[in-house]
Image (tube, rainbow, N blue to C red):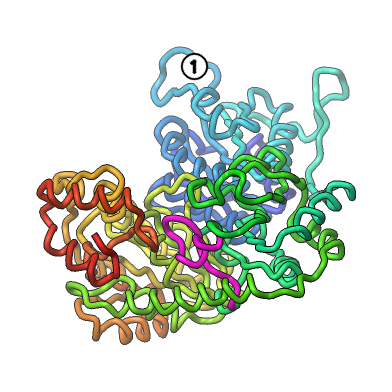
Amino acid sequence: MSEKTVADFLVERLRAWGVRRMFGYSGDGINGILGALQRAGEPIELIQPPHEELAALMASGYARFSGEVAVCMATSGPGAIHLLNGLYDAKLDHHPVVAIIGQQPTTGMGGGTQQEVDLLTLFKDVASAYVQQVNAPEQARHVIDRAFRVAHARRTVTCIILPHDVQAAPAVDEPPHDPKHQHSSAGYSAPRVVPAEDDLRRAAEVLNAGRKVAILVGAGALGAAAQVEDVAERLGAGVAKALLGKAVLPDDLPWVTGSVGWLGTSASNRMMTECDTLLMIGSGFPYTEFLPREGQARGVQIDIDASMLALRYPMEVGLVGDAAQTLALLAPMLERKEGRGWRERIEGWKKEWERTVDERADAPAHPVNPQRVIRSLSERLPDGAILAADSGSAAVWLARNVRIRRGMMASVSGTLATMGCAVPYAIAAKLAHPDRPAIAIVGDGAMQMIGLNALLTAARYRDRWTDPRLVILVLNNRDLNFVTWEQRAMEGAPKFPATQDLPDLPYADLAKLMGLDGVRVESPDEVDAAWERALAADGPFVIDAVVDPNVPTLPPEMQDEQRTMIRQALEAGDPDEAGVRAQLQAQGYEL
């Protein structure tokens, strides 16, 4: 057997950190690592999508749905550059990913050799918590260990750069015992982080004094459902959800008002407008115009990251701690509110919204109302389903029209809001949970951008899933739809076809060319049957739903400024003016 190399040591160390699979794309800058993966005694599964950006987005999705530190890998130069979007997606939503990147040989660096890029500079922002290049075999152990430990501890992106010649150098398992070397180990145990008792009591005083308490939960509250329910019941509060927190609580609870904000529900937004006390749990919801006005409500916030406290609203008490553990300590200090008038009002708003959203889904459209398609999915969601929605109109309809149940999971690109995330997220979810069904809701823009390539990955790895169901819904409206509506409602600008129009592709037929299955939906009468077929399929299935681009992706209740802007856009010669006016009326929006 040949001498163990640094690349072999890297693979061994990845196993020591519990890595079972990684996402990457081949290239000569990582040939040493690829060889080490091939000869490893305990192999690591390498998932290879057809583009490095997909690899990074799959790593971001895998971290979301598995709870593990995900790993992605690319060659030097262009391969490394392609990783950036997916890595920013993970960083901004606080998901731990370690990126392993090749580099040109150290002996030639600085000479402008082929594919030589200053990777330390390139990655110093996305991997600001930790990025290092391994320049000597003795350095490899502590760089790998620290990259993983920082990713775990800070829930962020870190980066290891491994030059080609260092990959092939003889490994050093144990560096010399002298001041020039570090001596690290693998392994991480998450600490118990809870606030001081005095801070908990101050928070309880604020919450006990409130008569109209609103709770807003985000991704940091995932895993704290029982504690959130307990606190909400004691306070007689309603619970709104930031989109990354959609799966925290099921939507069938009468006091869970659903998503908040532009993509939200009228019940959530009204609760924020009328509350006198706000409890935020694990959320960095950035759209402050949908939070209470400053001075309207007293505030308490719980977050594991102290830097997120009192950022979106001036909180009276900030509690640094794990959501579930902090709420468990806080709950006994809370007085049960006997008056339930506020809770009853919230439940009334929720019922009113559910009637509204169903009426909007039933409204006629040309040819199909996208809300009708999503409601049909919601009514048929299998137990334990995992949902991913792309950025844009797909996220709007997930937020409003999917009624999530206990045990389900859901995610979006929350902070970066990148296009192209949903299909790689859903495939990563299938790898993390091969026994559960996954559904991706995608706009045609994202599908053309990168989603079609991702279907190749689904076709390649489908035999690794015990539950074969992976459904990709393409909302085919031939339009970059969410931005088109933003132009109208925020800028007063008519649709600009040169930037907004998209070609009409046969997405189901393209899936069939890859060995998958699919169906095109061009009538409301075909919607239910398409979902029945897709959810009974024995492999990945694409629904190409031809939907009306003029169904508005506006806030649940249009504001005066938006009304003025839309009138201005239509009067300026919007090419879809007639259809837009018809759909605004059908959806209950008055100009």
Residue 289, position as x, y percentages in the image: 48, 47
| Residue at 81%, 54% in the rendered image | 205
Task: Classify mark 1: helix, strand or loop.
Answer: helix
Magenta residues span: 254-271
Where is residue 390, by image quadrant? bottom left
Query: Can you say whether 476 is above or below 10 in the image?
Result: below
The amino acid type found where label 1 is placed reads Gly
Question: Looking at this view, is 380 or 589 the one in front?
Answer: 589
Label 1 Cα neighbours within 10 Å, binned few <14 / some 14-19 / many ≥20: few
Where is residue 443, by image quadrant? bottom left
| Residue at 61%, 30% in the rendered image | 131
Question: Looking at this view, is 494 or 149 the one in front?
Answer: 494
Asked if residue 223 shows in the view, the reply is yes
Where is residue 448, by image quadrant? bottom left
Q: Quadrant of the N terminus?
A: top right
Residue 224, position as x, y percentages in the image: 71, 64
Query: Can you say whether 173 is above or below 57 in the image?
Result: above
Q: Is residue 260 magenta?
A: yes
Residue 579, position as x, y percentages in the image: 15, 64
| Residue at 64%, 23% in the rendered image | 135
Q: Answer with left or right where residue 303 lies relative to residue 403.
A: right
Residue matched to label 1: 108
Q: Answer with left or right where residue 246 lies relative to residue 519.
A: right
| Residue at 52%, 67% in the rendered image | 258
Asked if residue 59 shows in the view, the reply is no
Residue 565, position as x, y percentages in the image: 25, 47
Q: Quadrant of the C terminus?
A: bottom left
Q: Is residue 72 magenta?
A: no
